[in-house]
Amino acid sequence: MPFCRHRCGYCNFSVIADRDDLIRRFLIAIDTELQFIGRHAQTIPPLDTLFVGGGTPTHLPTDSLERFLSILCNRVDLQPDAEWSMEANPEDITDEKLALLADYGVNRLSLGIQSFNDRKLRTLDRSHSGEYAEATIRRAAQVIPNVSIDLIFAAPGESPADWHRDIRTAASLPIKHVSTYALTFEKGTSFWSRRNRGTLTTVDESDELAMYDDARNVFSEAGLAHYEISNFARSGFRCRHNLCYWSGDGWYAAGPGAAAFVDGQRVVNHRSTTTYLKRIENGESPIAESEKISDEQAARESAAFGVRLIDGIDLALLAGRTGIPIESLCAVELDQLLEQGLIERVEHRIKLTDRGIHFADTVASEFLG
Ligand code: SF4
């Protein structure tokens, strides 16, 4: 879902702001694409998870949101106990929209909260207030009990004490899951240019690490277990959809910029919403790139994602799935990482050590060759 109220200064997703005139065309196009996927894929079993992200799916006006939900229910066959997540921003959440989401079967809400601190929210170009974010979480949890929130740390001007207040507030609220991301400055965003001009400051690395460790402590004390580098969950509420990405299972995808991985083939749609719409309206494929993933690449990528899970990688399971044992494929790298104390071997698994958790990206890149 590519639509957003405005583009936040740090965002480099394929979103489209201030073009609500395209919503009607988008709904027709997504219906056509889903119908196409259903017709052309081999048999698709009822799906275990459905994740609607963006963009901001709840930015749609209520009548369009209802139309969108009915398209999904019509075109996507879900298991009876499927996890259906929907991303949402606090400023869009009305009681009417919450009831609509629940009625159509959405059972997990992922709220883009980012912070409860008004100054930080303004820096991040977010239009809600901290107080409103807290109230929205409480209100949403009464209708859709599985609420997840996203929080950003290391925002310009943020101190470890500011971040501590944010995570203490989060931990006191009725959430089942939280994802925390250090702010990154991506090329092409306004934050990137402002940093280069010196009008936005960055947080120094030692403060950023201290903030990350603080989140690990505060959330685990609050019963939100750290299960992936950036993710924490109460027991039974790990995100099933993301676990599917991280363990290298397959998934279908639809919409501008959407990337699917089915039967060893990765396909990515055009990022531009207008190109996506034109192609579908002309009866053409929205796919921009398609790549066959070799067994070796699949094994390397599964190891790189899998090692970000705090429980680590089950080597036998990975070899069973890809047919390639990672111990022989990456023997030298594994030895080096073990020697550097970044990973450890626990029976048939390898996992990040406490020190390795701070270097997860470096460890993951070793597996990619
Ligand atoms: S609301 Fe989210 S997706 Fe939309 S512009 Fe902001 S960060 Fe990007």
Image (spheres, rainbow, N blue to C red):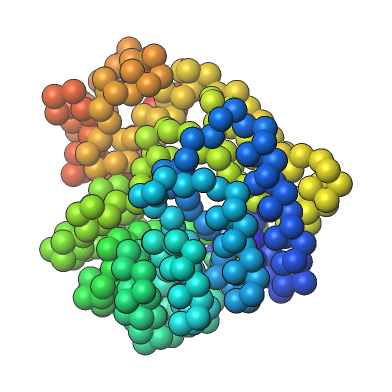
| Residue in the image at 53% along x and 58% along y | 53
Q: Position of residue 326 (x, y in %)?
A: 33, 19
Eyeballing the image, is 114 above or below 228?
Answer: below
Left or right: residue 255 versus residue 56 is right
Left or right: residue 277 versus residue 230 is right
Eyeballing the image, is 179 above or below 135?
Answer: above
| Residue in the image at 34% along x and 66% along y | 147
Q: Position of residue 131 (x, y in %)?
A: 37, 87
Left or right: residue 255 versus residue 97 is right
Task: Confirm whether residue 336 shows in the render.
Answer: no
| Residue in the image at 68% along x and 53% along y | 30
Residue nearest the viewer, comparing 103 with 98: 103
Q: Name the image quarter holding the N terminus.
A: bottom right
Task: Confirm whether residue 245 shows in the render.
Answer: yes
Ligand 1 appears in which quadrant? bottom right
Residue most extreme to the right: 282
Eyeballing the image, is 49 above or below 193?
Answer: above
Q: Position of residue 304 (x, y in %)?
A: 39, 33
Residue nearest the viewer, comparing 123 with 3: 3
Q: Name the image quarter holding the C terminus.
A: top left
Left or right: residue 308 versus residue 128 is left
Identify the image quadrant of residue 61: bottom right
Identify the image quadrant of residue 175: bottom left
| Residue in the image at 23% along x and 71% along y | 171
Please tell me how many numbered marks the rendered image carries: 0
Identify the image quadrant of residue 368: top left
Q: Position of residue 91 (x, y in %)?
A: 50, 80
Eyeballing the image, is 164 above or below 333?
Answer: below
